[in-house]
Amino acid sequence: MEETILVGDDLMMGPPSPIIPPEIASHVLEGVDVCDGILRNLFLCLQINDIEPFCQDEIVLYKQCAERRDKELRQRLQDSERKLGISMPLDEAKDRAAQLQSEVTSLERRLILASGVQGMEGFRQRWSLHGRLEDTKYSFASRFSSP
């Protein structure tokens, strides 16, 4: 049986971490393990050992922590968008919906442009844009869905 050795690029599987708007960051991040200690240990291991095969435990721990963190943050963002949508006057809610829809359109266009970029840089751009696009669509949908 072959053993799989994880590398830094394996941390880019699945969607990227959600972008937290600054105006709600303190509320959304409160009590969430942001994995900074585990990430610090991973960087220290890489600094000491210089290559990823010797830091498998740290990579796995960070990947698991980041997946839990991102899932919790996405849920909190959805809840915040829904609460904000309910508490906003109708005109402001319509403006916010238009803003989110505009952002979705912009991200879709940028994703199309990134599809022409070759190699790892193209992959990174598409990965990041796709994650942002999905999160924005999710925010838009959660704003107008029932609780």
Image (cartoon, grey):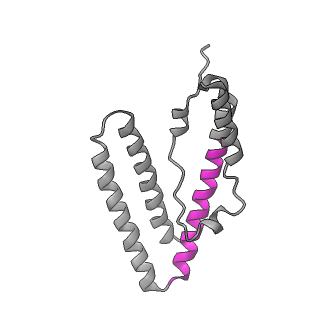
Quadrant where the C terminus sits is: bottom right
Q: Which segment did they paint magenta?
A: 64-88
Where 119 falls versus 145 (above or below)? above
Along the viewing direction, whichever of 135 and 28 lies nearer the viewer: 28
Q: Residue 101 appears in which quarter of the rendering?
A: bottom left
**Which secondary structure is most common in the magenta stretch?**
helix
Q: Is residue 65 left or right of residue 136?
A: right
- The verdict on residue 48 being magenta is no
Residue 33: x %, y % from top left: 70, 53
Q: Residue 53 appears in which quarter of the rendering?
A: top right
Taking the spot 58% from the left edge, 27% from the top edge, the residue there is: 6
Residue 17: x %, y % from top left: 54, 51
Where 97 falls versus 119 (above or below)? below
Taking the spot 43% from the left edge, 60% from the top edge, the residue there is: 137
Taking the spot 49% from the left edge, 64% from the top edge, the residue there is: 139
Residue 122: x %, y % from top left: 35, 39
Taking the spot 55% from the left edge, 76% from the top edge, the residue there is: 84
Furthest residue toward top:
1
Along the viewing direction, whichever of 19 and 52 lies nearer the viewer: 52
Q: Is residue 82 left or right of residue 111?
A: right
Quadrant where the N terminus sits is: top right
